[in-house]
Amino acid sequence: MSGGVPVARWLVACALAAVAAGARAGPLAERRKTTPAQLAVAAQRTVLPNGLVVILAPDPAASGVAVWMTFRAGAQRQPPGKSGLAHLVEHVLASGPTPDTDYAGMHELRRARHFNAATGLDALDFEAVVPAEELPFALWAMADRLGTLAPRIDAREVERNRKVVAQERAIRDVDAPYGLVGEQFFARLYAAPHPLHGGIIGTPEELASVTADDVRRFVAEYVVPANAVLVIAGRFDAAAARDLVLSTVGRLPAGRRAPRAVLPPPLREYIDAREEPLARRPRVTLAWRLPPGGREDAAALRLGAQLFTFFVDGAFGMELGAGFQEYDGEQLFEVELTVPYDEPMEVVHRDAEGFLRMLTHKEMPFDFLVAAHLALDRFALTELSTLEGRARALTRRELRIDSSADLATWLAWHWELDGYAVRDTAHRLLREPNLVLHARPKRPKKARVERQ
């Protein structure tokens, strides 16, 4: 970047030159390649007497069945000073230490091709994909985890899993490029007392303070049927599956559904600098915490995030990406720009802002916009091609505000938006970021040639 002049100016000029040609390409609807049938998943939704939401999506062509149980119990439900609690609960409940609670081992014996648990910002998942004939076992395991394993939680079991989480942090954060920068991202964007300030894994100090009583209280309050969604997708008889659900998880005590999260507001915008010990390339991150929005705002921001991937396309070895997440009570939009060798951070920062202005102030070239729409459809089709993907998509729809729409309509609604809608939404919502994070390498990679 000779003389500190952002290369984004050149890219903006290219984008503007393409607008006129894009305007002749025809309306968006003519460029769509998917049909509602390709994005549809036939599903039946019921609510059991204990409050559990059950979604059945039978598919006679499948060879197996996915059993997905999700609780509104992610990291944002943690009490002050207990970051990492939800993730620790996930580890404690996933599979117990005794043969009769070794759910991972029992699933393996029954030829499960997927067994996992995951903690997100607003959800706690327990997942399995088993042969169709093993559906009774998979539902028994889901129920036994709550009815048998939860009462056995003690200090020894919590400490055993705390060590596992500490090792996970060492691998994913401490010993990974930009891993500690990610921890700083959460600490700054979600400053205490926000429950996400320690991220999902949690800070070492706060995780060390979590007790068995904390784990038991969290489970009793949040890991209960009335606060859960159960999705079954694959080859099964719907009537038989309903009977199995009623005789297993349907018999558990209800508990109560967690209310909508009330979260502290974001701090004012500021720039934070973080030394990066492992990576050798400078990175700038811009992030916005946004209040919950409607369907149009969410679709426009998701399209905008996809459009960022087209702005650079390998120019000068730069990497540019963006992400958008909806979670209970908030939304998050994030932009990352990484440059290939040593550059002043203020120059990288200006480049990132230049790319952002392409989204907030310019109507996207028509072909760029079409490519973004098609990319979102490809992601949806890929997800729905697997049982676990269908279960994940049905769960995500249920947890969102607009859960009444059928899945095909929900997944394809972004086609209703044109370039003006994306630009206007981005201009309205992505003004000053709540956080600008500079990751400065300790040993930056030197430039081989002068950039022009």
Image (cartoon, rainbow, N blue to C red):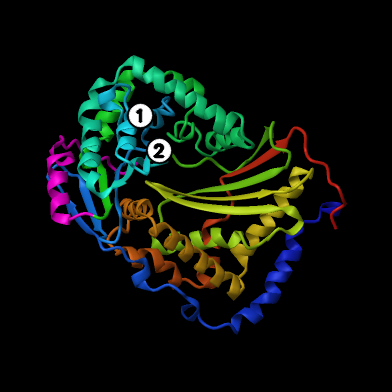
What residue do we see at 60% from left, 48% from top? 286
Q: Is residue 383 left or right of residue 57?
A: right
**Which residue is under mark 2?**
119
Q: Position of residue 55 (x, y in %)?
A: 23, 53
Category of crowding for the residue at label 2, using alpha-carbon neighbours closer than 10 angstroms: few (below 14), some (14–19), many (at least 20): many
Where 156 sits versus 29, above or below? above
Category of crowding for the residue at label 1, using alpha-carbon neighbours closer than 10 angstroms: few (below 14), some (14–19), many (at least 20): many
| Mark 1 residue element | helix
What residue do we see at 56% from left, 27% from top? 170
**Foreground residue among 424 and 120:** 120
Screen quadrant of the C terminus: bottom right
What residue do we see at 65% from left, 81% from top? 21
Between discs 2 and 1, the one toward the N terminus: 1
Amino acid bearing label 2: Thr
Q: Position of residue 443 (x, y in %)?
A: 77, 34
**Which residue is under mark 1?**
89
**Foreground residue among 384 and 227:** 384
Question: From which residue to which does the magenta span run?
Answer: 236-262
